[in-house]
Amino acid sequence: MTDLYLSSENIGDLTIENQSEISEDTRIELLNASYMALNYEAISETAKSLCRWLAQETAEADPERKRGRRGQKLEQFESAVTAVLAGLLRYSNEQPSMSYRTVSPNSFTDSLVSYRNFTSIIRGLRALGLIEPPIRGFYDRSQIPMGRATRFKPTPYLLTICSEWGVAPGDHKEHFAEAAPPDPIVLRASKKQSGRSASSRKDMKFEPTEKSLRFAAEVEEINEFVSQFEIEGANHAGFRRIFNQGDTEGFNWNKGGRLQVLVGRELPALSKKDRRGKSRSMASRLLRSTFEPVT
């Protein structure tokens, strides 16, 4: 038996059941969990129908949801359910397996799924008995030098329902595909100094210019090329370019603008320094494959 130390990771209102001891098999399962990228959409009519039905059932089962959703909010919720279901099924063949996701609110800033929708979906799935109690971010201090994100696991009941609808976990690629990357160009304001600390940069709306359109076209071309390949060891959802200080006088798309890798599987578990190096290394390799001929 191995001790499992729960971290103080902020998980909002997710239901968590504490465990003080786990078996060796469970420890291995925890460590081998795969990243839930939340960047998938349904591509088959069967999967779309399943996700619409599951969204309705999940919404009604959420014990904290008081009002229904309509219009755009309903569409966003259905898309979020699709992304969560795809993440749960992607790594589950005949037997359920774990996936992981950092669940602090700020980790959803650039996600296609909002923090509010994600927590509502998890509550609903738990109420329906479709996922196991999430295992909160933890430290196995005898084996792991750093914390691990929250683990999620589908129940056999969820897999049975999906199979009855015709969406078997082993046929994931027939029913789900990675969604298109978000806006290829992001413009952010300057950091605002408040006492000794500075606030984070806020995204800005902007009118496209000839230069911004050219930069966006370049990123979209790279993303289109990279989408033709399956990248192992990472959930690569494309590139984008983030420009800074858009509110300063004389700004001309000349601050920042480095390519940023979106949703790297290994990046969330790394330190800021190592994450930056990993991201740049990955971007460099992909760009070389894009612009350098293979000999």
Image (cartoon, rainbow, N blue to C red):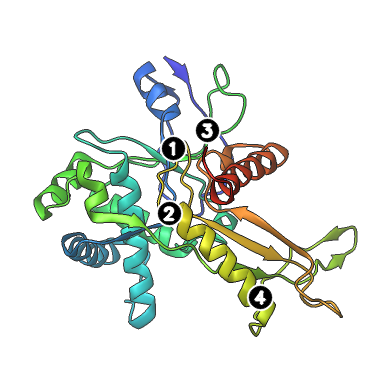
In percent of width and height, residue 256 lies at: 76, 62
Q: Which numbered dot is residue 138?
A: 3
Q: Please give the residue where the numbered disc 2 appears in the rendered image.
A: 227
- Disc 3: CA contacts within 10 A as few (<14), some (14-19) or many (>=20): many
Q: Residue at x 17, y 46 (%)?
A: 168
Considering depth in this image, is 289 or 169 the residue closer to the camera? 289
Q: CA distance from mark 1 to mark 4?
A: 31 Å
- Disc 2: CA contacts within 10 A as few (<14), some (14-19) or many (>=20): some
Disc nearer the start of the sequence (2/3): 3
Q: Residue furthest top?
A: 1
**Quarter occupied by residue 159:** top left
Compared across the picture, whether 123 is left or right of 46 comes to right
**How many numbered circles are shown?**
4
Q: Residue at x 24, y 62 (%)?
A: 51
Type of amino acid under label 1:
Glu
Considering depth in this image, is 141 or 215 the residue closer to the camera? 215
Q: Secondary structure at mark 2?
A: loop
Type of amino acid under label 4:
Ser
Type of amino acid under label 2:
Ser
Q: CA distance from mark 2 to mark 4?
A: 22 Å
Q: CA distance from mark 3 to mark 4?
A: 43 Å
Q: Which numbered dot is residue 212?
A: 4
User: Is the C-beta separation of discs 1 and 4 under 8 Å?
Assistant: no
Residue 223 appears in the rendering: yes
Q: Please give the residue where the numbered disc 1 appears in the rendered image.
A: 232
In percent of width and height, residue 106 lies at: 59, 57
- Disc 1: CA contacts within 10 A as few (<14), some (14-19) or many (>=20): few
Compared across the picture, whether 148 is left or right of 64 comes to right
